Amino acid sequence: MFETLRENKYFNEVVKFLQEKKLYQNSYLVGGSVRDLLLKRDLKDIDFTIKGDSIELAKEFSRKIGATFVLLDEVFSIGRVVKDNVTIDFAQLSGESIETDLSERDFTINAMATDLSLKNLIDPFGGMDDLKNRLIKMVKEENLKADPLRILRAYRFHATVNFDIENNTREALKKNAFLMKVTARERIKEELWRILSVDNSARTVEMMVEDEIFKAFFKMPELLQIRTNLQALIIIEEALRNPEKIFTHHKITFNPNIIACLKFTGIFEHHALSFIKQIKPSKKEERFVEKLIEAGVSIKKVETLLDKIRFVKNYENILYPALIYGISTDPLGMARAWLYREIEHFYKKVYLKNKKKLPLIKGEDILSLGFEPSPLIGEIIERIETLVLAGKISKKEEALEEIKRRYGAEQVVGMTEKG
């Protein structure tokens, strides 16, 4: 049942360490580790419950193997050890027995354990059956109330392990969702980002909308309703899975935070900035959402070549997310993919090539033509830059001719004679 774990270097290191501490008989592999092993999923975290001072043990073990110690939860006595992208959690046994400890957990699929011999599955709440039936079922409602973030975690498991939520459990989630108002905002964001990290998170988000989960922790101005755009999320996920349906540049990859922010903005559109501020984002995340919303408005005005240049210049550093967000909010959706493909084609084939030619002229060049310092200098530079990016001019002499044509021949006599 747990054969792969027997070959895990860090599991064996922990077992040896606990044997030395005379804690082998009172220690267990628990929760998500047992669940993932039974599902034959890659084991990212190794979770131990120990009848002892788990935080001090985690500190000592981290020193022993040259790892990093993190105080994960002082209230629940959880210490984390991190090394080589492996996470090992030491938690203190709750109650006098492992059965008591498991009775205080969130869902039956997470309320299983095994002793360190890996020979005996401890499953007092039928978690194994729920795994087979692909079902998320609460251990008891009181446990959801004890830590309301578990309500959001149910939807995360719905997304990440693709299980259904048992009917009574779903009713309890809806009934107690309001308790999340007191949950730390950072913890809510972490769970939301995990949901949105899934390729097909739309089915889970749709359930959360039906269950009014977002209303439980997002505040809206009085008299306004939280509105969600599930169709935009569906289009975004389709674009991320199959970028060739829109772009000629098929290999598009974003970091997980960009994906989460993009989907979040698709769901909540112009309210996304207000909502993300409520869950303690990083400055980069907040700024990205703000720029994405701006881009969504701007892209609707793109018609001419000049519009394309302005759009690409303003949003070059987020161009692909901006295009995906734009098509997700376009009334015609994928039916107008040609417009977004045109913008991408212009960016790749024209804009990037011509950008290398900049700057053709500088402010001092224009002042030497006889112009007085004024906002006009900036206007001239911007116009020349635009013409270069459009591929209309490519040499300094052509820029001077354009200035001469546009702003008056007498101004450029001195410069052309010197040249």
Image: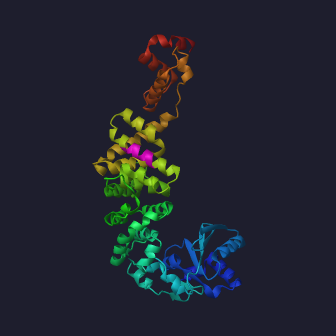
**In front of the other: 260 or 213:** 213
Please check the rendered image and state whether residue 299 is part of the magenta-colored stretch, yes or no.
Answer: no
Tell me if 311 is positioned left or right of 364 in this view.
left
In magenta, the rendered stretch is 289-296
Q: Residue at x 40, y 43 (%)?
A: 295
State the count of labels: 0
Tell me if 300 is positioned left or right of 138 in this view.
left
Helix, strand or loop for the magenta stretch, by majority: helix
Q: Residue at x 34, y 34 (%)?
A: 304
**In front of the other: 169 or 35:** 169
Q: Visible in this render: residue 251? A: no
Q: For residue 207, which quarter of the picture?
A: bottom left
Asked if 388 appears above or below 164 in the picture, the reply is above
Residue 124: give x, y in percent of width and height. Answer: 47, 87
Residue 147: give x, y in percent of width and height. Answer: 47, 71
Residue 149: give x, y in percent of width and height. Answer: 46, 68
Residue 358: give x, y in percent of width and height. Answer: 52, 31
Asked if 209 appears above or below 355 in the picture, the reply is below
Q: How is the image coloured?
A: rainbow
**In front of the other: 269 or 233:** 269
Q: Visible in this render: residue 57? A: yes
Looking at the figure, which quarter contains the C terminus? top right
Tell me if 378 is positioned left or right of 74 in this view.
left
